[in-house]
């Protein structure tokens, strides 16, 4: 079926084209007017930002703001630049001046409070920052405010508040904070352990495991607490749980576990007929099993020293030789040379070789943060540099000279 063509449509089409052309011209004129109203220093500032010349960009945007004092956008850009360049006092003054001397809508006022709260946070004025961020909890800036509040409470070691905010942030964002919450409970437990409040400490550690069943630190602390109370069988049982969580952390408790095994033996009965005490024997067997299964260098170090003391240089040398064959490293070579020097006729030559190896090893073995590269000689559950939790691997790394140079450049 054909549709009858209406000739009067031909009169309307040119009208549509004319209206579209007029609208386009109006938009172009408006765009030109807006761009020409911006100071030239504004575009200069943008170019400096692109070139990462922040201090020069501050001067350019300051001049632009002087020429266009009513531009909130310029205030925000300049305030952000002040924070970036460390001039937080100027950022605070800038945003407080806006709140006190300008007529603002509620949305504009809220946006400026966000900026001012960040100024206080950057300046380390956490009480003032906290007060402002708390007022932003039920605004469109809620998630950003909660993240800042969480960071404030962690920095100030206010672990109960951190737990509450983390739970609120998890509900708001849908992102899990279970790992962090478990660590906060462990921090509360540490405070209780210092005060020897064992019941409170255990309660916090149980809560840590409820929050994150794979929280290794909770079982480490439960074992430490039991050992302090001379409950060595319980301590060993807690530390053994780590194998089911993350076996790579077993090296952190190997020495403690061996001591508790030894403590389980009768201290006055070194064994029948001079034999090795039962507890020490069981402890060495347990560590040997872990070494065979997981091949952790930290367990090897504990096992080597214990074997050297309990069974002599020959046994220790055999252990070091087997480890050197299975997993060659300068550390294992050093251990082998040390043990052989105790029994070999060429003692002086072996000691010289051992000293050469130790000079080559130096202090390279360390823990390196996965997030920021921070180097630590001891394990930290929280990186001292970037404050990330569980970012240091549980096994120390023997960094090469090239690795150390790269880390120093960072």
Image (spheres, helix red, strand yellow):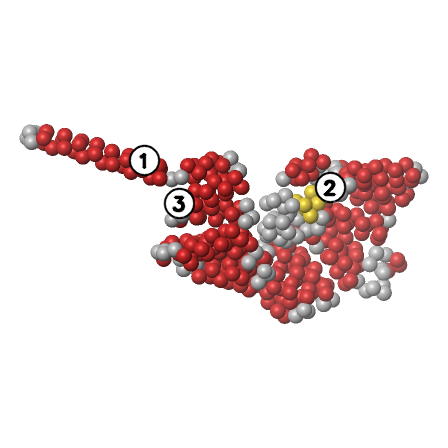
Quadrant housing the C terminus: top right
| Residue 363 at least partly seen | yes
State the image coordinates of residue 300 (x, y, percent, origin top left): 75, 46
State the image coordinates of residue 173 (x, y, percent, origin top left): 44, 53
* Of the image marks 2 and 3, the number of the one nearer the N terminus: 3
Q: Is residue 270 left or right of residue 194?
A: right
Asked whether 400 or 113 is in front, the reply is 113
How far separated are the C-alphas under marks 1 and 2?
62 Å
Farthest right residue in view: 345
What residue appears at the point 53 percent right and 53 percent down from the top-left corner?
Answer: 89
Q: Which residue is mark 3?
A: 68
Quadrant in the rendering for residue 228: bottom right
How far separated are the C-alphas under marks 1 and 3?
17 Å
Asked whether 269 or 2 is in front, the reply is 2
Question: How many marks on residues?
Answer: 3
Query: Are there few (<14), some (14-19), or many (20+) residues within 10 Å of tag 2?
Result: some
Q: Is residue 193 above or below residue 305?
A: below
Q: Is residue 7 left or right of residue 227?
A: left
| SS label for mark 3 | loop
* Of the image marks 1 and 2, the number of the one nearer the N terminus: 1
| SS label for mark 2 | loop
Quadrant in the rendering for residue 324: top right
| SS label for mark 1 | helix
State the image coordinates of residue 174 (x, y, percent, origin top left): 45, 53
Which one is closest to the eye, mark 1 or mark 3? 3
Q: Which residue is mark 2?
A: 364
Q: Is residue 313 above or below residue 213?
A: above
Q: Which residue is mark 1?
A: 32
* Of the image marks 1 and 3, the number of the one nearer the N terminus: 1
CB under 8 Å between discs 2 and 3: no
State the image coordinates of residue 261 (x, y, percent, origin top left): 76, 59
């Amino acid at each position: 079926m054909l549709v009858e063509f209406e000739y009067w449509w031909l009169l309307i089409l040119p009208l549509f084209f004319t209206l579209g052309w007029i609208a386009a011209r109006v938009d172009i004129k408006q765009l030109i007017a807006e761009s020409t109203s911006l100071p030239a220093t504004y575009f200069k500032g943008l170019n400096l930002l692109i070139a990462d010349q922040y201090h020069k960009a501050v001067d350019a945007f300051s001049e632009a703001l002087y020429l266009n004092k009513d531009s909130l956008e310029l205030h925000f850009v300049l305030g952000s630049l002040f924070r970036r360049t460390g001039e937080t006092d100027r950022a605070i003054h800038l945003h407080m001046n806006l709140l006190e001397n300008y007529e603002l809508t509620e949305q504009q006022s809220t946006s400026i409070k966000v900026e001012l709260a960040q100024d206080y946070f950057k300046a380390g004025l956490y009480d003032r920052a906290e007060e402002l961020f708390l007022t932003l909890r039920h605004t469109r800036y809620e998630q950003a405010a909660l993240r800042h509040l969480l960071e404030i409470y962690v920095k100030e070691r206010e672990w109960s508040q951190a737990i509450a905010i983390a739970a609120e942030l998890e509900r708001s964002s849908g992102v899990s904070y279970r790992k962090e919450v478990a660590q906060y409970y462990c921090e509360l437990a540490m405070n209780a352990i210092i005060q020897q409040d064992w019941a409170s400490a255990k309660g916090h550690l149980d809560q840590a495991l409820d929050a994150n069943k794979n929280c290794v630190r909770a079982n480490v602390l439960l074992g430490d607490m039991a050992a302090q109370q001379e409950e060595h069988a319980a301590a060993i049982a807690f530390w053994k749980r780590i194998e089911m969580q993350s076996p790579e952390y077993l090296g952190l408790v190997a020495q403690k576990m061996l001591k508790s095994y030894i403590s389980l033996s009768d201290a006055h009965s070194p064994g029948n007929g001079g034999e090795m005490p039962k507890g020490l024997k069981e402890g060495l067997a347990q560590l040997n099993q872990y070494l065979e299964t997981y091949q952790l260098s930290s367990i090897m170090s504990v096992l080597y020293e214990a074997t050297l003391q309990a069974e002599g240089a020959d046994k220790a040398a055999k252990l070091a030789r087997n480890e050197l064959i299975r997993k060659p490293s300068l550390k294992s070579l050093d251990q082998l040379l040390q043990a052989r020097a105790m029994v070999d006729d060429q003692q002086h030559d072996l000691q010289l070789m051992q000293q050469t190896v130790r000079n080559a090893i130096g202090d390279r073995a360390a823990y390196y943060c996965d997030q920021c590269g921070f180097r630590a000689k001891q394990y930290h559950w929280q990186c001292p540099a970037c404050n990330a939790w569980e970012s240091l691997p549980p096994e120390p790394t023997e960094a090469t000279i090239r690795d150390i140079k790269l880390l120093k450049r960072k």
